[in-house]
Amino acid sequence: MNDNEQNPRVASDADFDLQMSSQQMLSLASKAAELIVDRVTGLSKEKAWDGEFRQSLAQQLMSDPPEEGTSAADVLERAAHEILPFALRLDHPRSFGFIPSSPTWPGIVADFMAAGFHINQCTWLVASGPSQLELLVIDWFRKWLGYPESAGGLLTSGASAASVDALVAARESAGYPDSATVYMSDQSHSALPRAAKIIGIRPHCIRLIPSDAHFRMDMTALAQAVAGDRKKGFNPIAVVANAGTSSTGAIDPLRKLAVFCEKEGIWLHVDAAYGGFAIVTDVGKQLLAGIERADSVGLDAHKWFFQPYEAGSLLVKDATSLEHAFAFRHDILQDTVWGANHPNLADRGLQLSRSVRALKIWASVQTFGMAAFRRAVSKGMELATRAGEYIRDSSMLELLTPVSLGIVCFRVNPQDISLDDESLEGVNKDVLARVFWDGQAFYSSTLVGEIFALRLCIVNHTTTWEDVRATLESTERFGQMAVDRVQLTPER
Ligand SMILES: Cc1ncc(COP(=O)(O)O)c(C=O)c1O
């Protein structure tokens, strides 16, 4: 009697229920590749956005896991046709909402490779090759930022995680004081106050500093807030600057902030999640001058560096400050400290188990070269500038803020008719709803001060001027319809 006969629940050595033959693996992988290539090459013929109401999706999807499996190819088909299409197509050439992104094919395939080689990019012992690769990619970023050799960092899931890591390092470097305060502009991304809250900064100690007429942090208000807090016994530990707000693309006065923070002994973190990769271009270098003086910078390669999610990063001017904050000894990891001169990247942030995020960045840069990346980033800024010119020349549209990086904030406001603020807001909300349901393009809205604004973020390497022009033209058309509707509606 073998083990199985004694206890039917014990599998024999020969049972690999969860394994496939090499032929099955290859055919499933090529099925997936076919489905993805079909999607990517057919994108411009699809709508930029698709979505479904929850009730209908729940009816279709919610079921208990099956006891017995089914054809793997059918499962992928189902995913590709019944689930995944119901989403914003962020890489569609006319997708301009929020912060879109358009990953390159080598980056996508590299993520598949990273999963297939099944690496845990935690420590040198466990993943030395991938660790060195991450150091290389971080070193590229370091040089682009103009940081000294003492700088270093790590790849993260995104800017939200990078911001938490940065604020932890800031707090440690300030000596972990009580009554700590953190400062950021009222234009900062919600990821930043959330990061401050996560590290234990009390809500009343998170200071949202007013921004000026150009949505940049007001330096006088910052200085007053810091001085006032010190008098009251608070301990300022960090100022967060924006290098490209997600709303209007505004860049805080980075040099002035660096001088201020150096004088005050406060950590300066720059949230360059969206705008940071402009630094690879000459124009971007000038716009972001001063960033090299910050104590830390967060940059998302899944935004303007054409990578699949998740490809965030955090760089700190003094690499040891991260390890000082994050390295912990643990018996089960004691073997990983043997050897010399090798960092364990898990000691630099909040994650232990980590995927090989560097592979996609490295693979796509190796494949296309930096000149191509530079041109792609420049193109976004050029198209945004051109969109701004189109809007200035249009009798239907109004540019609301200067175009900055890839962001254009505008609204429908016909020159020949005078509409009050409320009607204008109604018209623009109506236009946005028409854009969503039309689906030929997708963009989103923001608030410019109190004004409801339409907003394009142009950072896709496959977007052409024709895509931008057609989107603005349809906005003018929808604008006319919305205005006509307001004029036809009798006053109550
Ligand atoms: C300026 C800025 N900061 C932070 C974030 C949050 O980044 P993530 O989604 O990578 O966590 C975003 C996201 O769009 C952003 O635009």
Image (cartoon, grey):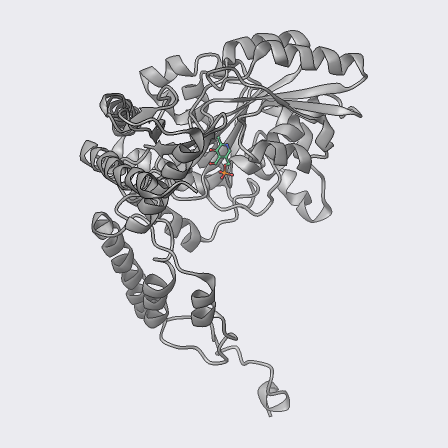
Q: Nearer the viewer, residue 21 or 99?
A: 99
Can you see residue 246?
A: no
Left or right placement of residue 38 versus residue 317 in this view = left
Q: Quadrant of the C terminus?
A: top left
**Residue found 35% across the figure and 22% down from its top:** 403
Residue 7 sits in quarter: bottom right
**Residue found 50% across the figure and 17% down from its top:** 216
Residue 33 image position (x, y, % from top left)? 28, 57
Residue 321 sits in quarter: top right
Left or right placement of residue 491 versus residue 155 in this view = left
Is residue 126 placed above or below 465 in the rendered structure?
Answer: below
**Residue found 62% across the figure and 40% down from its top:** 350
Residue 180 image position (x, y, % from top left)? 74, 24
Q: Nearer the viewer, residue 38 or 246?
A: 246
Q: How many marks?
A: 0
Residue 414 sits in quarter: top left
**Residue found 71% across the figure and 19% down from its top:** 236
Q: Nearer the viewer, residue 213 or 278?
A: 213
Q: Nearer the viewer, residue 489 or 371?
A: 489
Can you see residue 83?
A: yes
Residue 1 image position (x, y, % from top left)? 60, 93
Is residue 254 placed above or below 38 in the rendered structure?
Answer: above
Is residue 332 placed above or below 61 in the rendered structure?
Answer: above
Residue 163 image position (x, y, % from top left)? 58, 32
Left or right placement of residue 141 versus residue 175 in this view = left
